[in-house]
Amino acid sequence: MKYKYEFANENKSIEISEEWISVLEELDRLEYNNNHAETRRHVSLDDGEDGEWLSTERGEVYIRCAGQIFSRHDDRFDDGRRSLSEKQDELYESVYEYGDSINDYAHDSGIDQSTASKRNRAVIKKFKKVFE
């Protein structure tokens, strides 16, 4: 029986037994399911709103401002940090440098979650102003 194999740049048909065809079809199905699951887990850097914080790994932080993505290694990041109040800088360090959640930060700081969320919005607003 012939099996059609699709390469990136061409298609080939090969003669193999039906037993191997069922194995190859199962592998194709598993590959499709895996690819589909992976694409659902990841967010495109092209999607999202200004002021959104992005992180690839612990300690590597980016922010989306004015439709672009800026690395924390950009000099304007330092300007943004200097514009923060002491409490805002504590939140920035805890959440964006060490990877704590807003809720963890609120609990550790002894403040309400809503207060921490407002503080976080203020941090984002200040960074956004620096990057625009």
Image (cartoon, grey):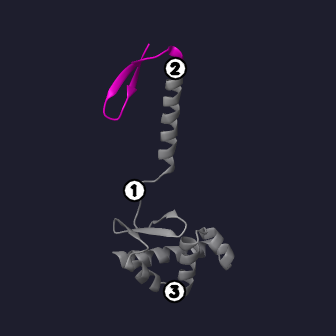
The three-letter code of the residue at mark 2 reads Trp
**Residue 94, image x and y in percent?**
59, 75
**Residue 89, image x and y in percent?**
53, 82
Residue 117 seen in this snapshot: no
Q: Residues within 10 Å of mark 2 (few under 14, many from 20)?
A: few
Which of pointers 2 and 1 lies earlier in the amino acid sequence? Answer: 2
> Which element carries disc 1, helix, strand or loop?
loop
Residue 1, compared with residue 63, is above or below; it is above
Which of pointers 3 and 1 lies earlier in the amino acid sequence? Answer: 1
| Residue at which label 3 appears | 85
Picture disc at residue 20: 2
> Which element carries disc 3, helix, strand or loop?
loop
Q: Of the residues tagged 2 and 3, which is closer to the observer? A: 2
Q: Residue at x 58, y 68 (%)?
A: 99
Q: Of the residues tagged 2 and 1, which is closer to the observer? A: 2
**Residue 53, image x and y in percent?**
47, 67
Q: Residue at x 33, y 26 (%)?
A: 11
Picture disc at residue 47: 1
The image quadrant that residue 67 belongs to is bottom left
Q: Magenta segment, which residues?
A: 1-21
The image quadrant that residue 77 belongs to is bottom left
